[in-house]
Amino acid sequence: MLSYIWPLALVVLSNVFYQISAKSVPEAMNPFASLTITYAVGAAASLVLYFALNKEANLLREYSRVNWAPFLLGLVIVGLEVGYIYAFKAGWPVSTAQIVQAAVLAVILIFVGRVLYQESITWNKIAGVIVCLIGLGLINLK
């Protein structure tokens, strides 16, 4: 059970600090310049963790297994990061931006799951979409 829960707990905890960090990027700093520091720290941490957690670590072997996904993920992560930074600079509250994007994303991913991975669209998922849309309406009420 722990192996099922700890990854999402890590995502939640990381996301809390992610939102705080993205909201705290200095207003006068260019978001892309900020991301150069972010990715340098991330690359260093990834390298250290790779060697610390793998007894038979071999980066060249790992790199020989690469496909298109890490390259696209790198570009997508830049979009996520800079999107949040600009959203916060535009005035989105930290308590709302994440919820709005998560609700919209949840609706979109139901269809992505169906089209790309043949996941079923159940009545529970449809009800979830409706709840997400209602939640978006409630959250954005002034």
Image: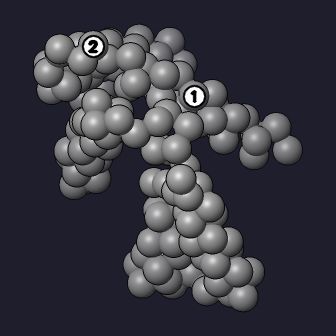
Tell me the quarter of the picture where residue 61 sits.
top left
User: Which numbered disc, 1 or 2, marks the residue that appears first in the sequence?
Assistant: 1
Q: Is residue 47 above or below residue 124?
A: above
Q: Secondary structure at mark 2?
A: loop
Q: How many marks?
A: 2
Residue 74, placed above or below residue 141: above
In the picture, measured across the screen, residue 17 lies left or right of residue 59, that is: right
- Nearest to the observer: residue 84 or residue 41: 84
- Examine the rendered structure and indicate whether residue 6 appears above or below residue 59: below
Q: In this view of the protein, which residue sits in the foreground, 88 or 19?
A: 88
Count residues near mark 1 (Cα–Cα under 10 Å), then give few for <14, some for 14-19, many for 20+.
few
Disc marking residue 16:
1
Where does the image place residue 66, in percent across and percent down from the top left? 26, 46
Q: Is residue 117 visible?
A: no
* Nearest-to-viewer mark from 1 and 2: 2
Residue at image mark 2: 26
Viewport quadrant of the N terminus: top right
How far, Cα to Cα, is label 1 from label 2?
Answer: 18 Å
Identify the amino acid type marked 2. Answer: Pro
Q: Position of residue 6 (x, y in %)?
A: 72, 35
What residue is shown at x 31% (from left), y 17% (from top)? 25
Taking the spot 57% from the left edge, 81% from the top edge, the residue there is 119
The foreground one among 47 and 11 is 11
Rendered location of residue 27, percent (x, y) = 24, 18
